[in-house]
Image (spheres, coloured by chain):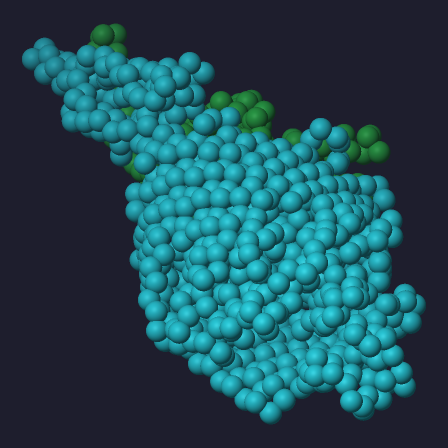
Amino acid sequence: MKKFAFVLFTVWATQLIMAQTPNEKYVGFMKKSLALLDSARGPADWQAAANNFERIANNEKTEWLPAYYAAYAMVMKAYAVENVKDIDPACEKADAMIALAESLAPNHSEITTLKAMVLTAKMRADGGRGMTMGPQATQYCQQALQQQPLGNPRAFMQMAQMLYYTPAAFGGGKDAGIGMLGKSVAAYDSFKPESELHPNWGKGYSVKLLEQWKSGK
Amino acid sequence: MKYFTLLGLYNLLTLCLAAQSTVLSGTVVDSRKRPITGASVSIKDSYDGATTDSIGKFRFVTTEAGTQTLLVSFMGFKSWEQVVALGSNPLVFEVQLKEEPNELTAVVITAGSFEASDQKKTTVLKPLDIVTTASANADVAAAMRTLPGTQQVGESAELFVRGGEGYETRQFIDGTTVANPFFGQAPNIASRGRFSPFLFKGTVFSTGGYSALYGQAMSSALILESIDLPDQSSASASLSPLFVGAQYQHLAKNKNSSWGISGGYTNLSLYFNLVKQRPDYFKAPAISNGEANFRIKTSKTGMLKFYGSYQQQNLGLRNPDIDIDTLKNSFGLTNANIYTNLSYRERLTGRMKLNAGFSFSLNKDDIRQRVLNADNEEAVGNFPVFVQQKNFDLRAKGILVQGRAVVDYKLKGLSALRAGAEYWYSQDQSTFNVFTSRLKDHYTSVFGEADLYLSNALAARVGVRAEHTSLLQRTNVAPRASLAYKLGGGAQVTADYGMFYQKPQSQFLLFANNLPQMRADHYILTYQKVTLSRVFRTQLFHKSYKQLIKYGADTTSNGKGYARGVEFFWRDKTTFKNFDYWVTYSYIDTKRDYLNFPFEMQPNFAANHTANLVVKRFFTKMSTQFNANYQFATGRPYYNIAYNASNNKWDLRDQGRTIPFHSLSLSINYLKNIGKAFGVFVFSVNNALNSRQVFGYTYSYDGTNKVATVPPANRFFFLGVFLSWGVDRTQDAINNNL
């Protein structure tokens, strides 16, 4: 009888796996990939995570999130690479993924925030780009905030970092940055992602950074 | 029991199906068998896949079965695909990816030119460099004069490149040429460019061997690309003892279109009261200007842009007469200029792009020269003919209408084909005293070129340009070619060849229109090494001139000449922290037998050695940028050439060489927010060390008196403030949001 129960159980379990609907498969894969993304530490990890999401994006032609995360992972890689010459290729890939995500979800605050992040990464490759890309990045942040009236904490965080490293003469400065980051932390507190797959990253970093900035003053 | 067995069998079957999995593993390497890290390996149309590790290895398990496609891809490489039969046997792959030529890593065909752009990685200059070069005072051409290949010709605003005259350098805005890029000029006193550097997002300065897309320039092309839609609506104002100006740009709410207007007034009389000038200005240079523009995004990939300007300029000055010391010469100039440019670009299909342009310009000069007595009245008396001839009125009017279209077809990778045509209609009318002459020309040209990337490291460009001018009734075919090879480590070599035609200037065509086009052939070898913060470039060139204008008893096209030399450019942004500098050195050996030269001689605009040091440093805490540059050139030759009526020949009566040219220029830009405005304060001084500069000598008719050509004042000072206000509603939106 024990044997019978086991057989029955395996039948049930196998059938359950086999009968997984496409959506469940998508969600499952996304969760797995998000877990990988969360544990990413270096450029190689970010690249692997981006590859995962790109594979999902290639299969799910109507979902914007896989392309969004692929772009996000590539931006993070661009921030993490040691050799500055690796920045532009990563940004180029991120731009392509952003374009794909945007075609599926136009005028989305999270995607617009990514655009600002890509520009920030590009400026890291070449300081001379700041004069034109800096204001453009600021604009993307402003646009992202407009697109999400309740306040996108990631857009605030990006804006804060740009302000912090902008000389006060250009309307930035440490105080302005800290003030903006405070808004980010507050926005994180009230932020509720649309689903467990939707963007919900950055809170820990934002809180930590704020402490660091405040103590470093 | 039977039921139980059946169930077991079914179970086994499903389990088998579910568990049927294949292990795929292998390595991914590049063409030189070096491992590729981070490559994506996947089963097409499935979630299954992996990423290669630090030694290029991958391994994953897939539950997909049957015939599938394995796909390997990585940035900068062509994707690799293979059909695989998935069973239960493990599969091992050795994948070699081929590099895909792409803009970031490929060899640069146009390495011989200097480009200022924010977008492209490989550029030597940034747009901001043009406005922060100390000696340039925000003049595009003056900034280019800190680059190798250019001469320090202080008495002209034009660019004299590699043994070429100033008119051999042509400026192009969005593809169409500019007939009068500089303000009107008094004899031997440099004016400046008509266009603000802030109008352009990209500048390419080619000192030779440039694309078949551009013609009618024997030496050099300055290719300017105007900005697209502004980031936001804004207003700006400029204030200086020399000028006032205001500008407004409006960006539509949907961000698909913008318009703008600007106006300004320049008057140097206050400045001339403070800083003494050598000529006696009875009318200090004054300019009134107005501009308008619009830009419309016609589709996701289409853009229509218009820019139009009107400028009116006056000046008048007196200098001592060179022949009779009790007399003076007065020179008065009134110039009016209309310039318009309409350009359109659109992606027609995925691979095909169209660039079209239309331009109309009108230039009117009214020049009046008189011989005056000591009381500044028109001198009357029985003067020799050569003195009487100094009294003249010249009224010139020039119209240029242009249309142009270029189609760009993208081939595989970075390879591309370009083909296009252009048409110029020009009409020049001049009245010298009472003699009026008119010249009309229909100039048509067709051109094509191919960029062929044979690999990431080897690329060629071949082009040809055919031109016809109705005035000269000639058709010329000009081939162009470039070959570029990448050596690795950011280094590459480029070889350029080209044939360049240009119509003789209209003052010669008035007397003889059966002349052929003038011709220059370029041969250039470039080596450059570009890393993120350092650029080294050296160029070796040879240039031969044919069919130049030569006049004696008749105007002919028997003139010829050559120029050859070597140039160096070094820019370094890292060795000294926050400190950016570049150094250039140019050597040229050039001779010409043209115009009234009795034989082949070094032209008087060419110095054998020219050098520049440009230094920039930004102090973040002070919000201040300091710029300095030092320009040096060895002495230039000068000649006294006089016509010998007895044998109808030109004689060289005297010659010499000027003192070397030195100029140290300094500028300070201080950034400060004033209320809601962002302000930039600029102070600059050209030739801060007060060095004596001599550009050449002019001789009296009898050759006994020679007068040095010198700048109107040794030093030039500038002080001004530029304010801008960003009128941006999103700012309000955020403030409300917080």
Look at 63% across and 75% down and name the residue there.
Answer: B291
- The picture places residue B385, in percent across and down from the top left corner, at 70, 83
Q: How many marks?
A: 0
Q: Colour of chain A?
A: green
Q: Is residue B634 visible?
A: yes
- The picture places residue B687, in percent across and down from the top left corner, at 82, 52
Taking A201 as reference, is B337 above or below it?
below
Furthest residue in direction right, as rendered: B274
Taking B63 as reference, is A105 above or below it?
below
Q: Is residue A181 visible?
A: no
Furthest residue in direction left, as rendered: B2
- The picture places residue B204, in percent across and down from the top left corner, at 54, 52
Q: Nearer the viewer, residue B724 or B115?
A: B115
- The picture places residue B258, in percent across and down from the top left corner, at 57, 69
Look at 74% across and 83% down and name the residue there.
Answer: B384
Look at 59% across and 79% down and name the residue there.
Answer: B363
Q: Nearer the viewer, residue A170 or B41?
A: A170
Which chain comes out cyan in the rendered image? B
Task: Tell whether B537 sits left or right of B48.
Answer: right
Look at 82% across and 77% down and name the residue there.
Answer: B324
Task: Tell whether B553 sits left or right of A151.
Answer: left
Q: Quadrant of residue B582?
A: top right
Furthest residue in direction top, as rendered: A2
Q: Quadrant of the N terminus of chain B?
A: top left
Q: Quadrant of residue B388?
A: bottom right
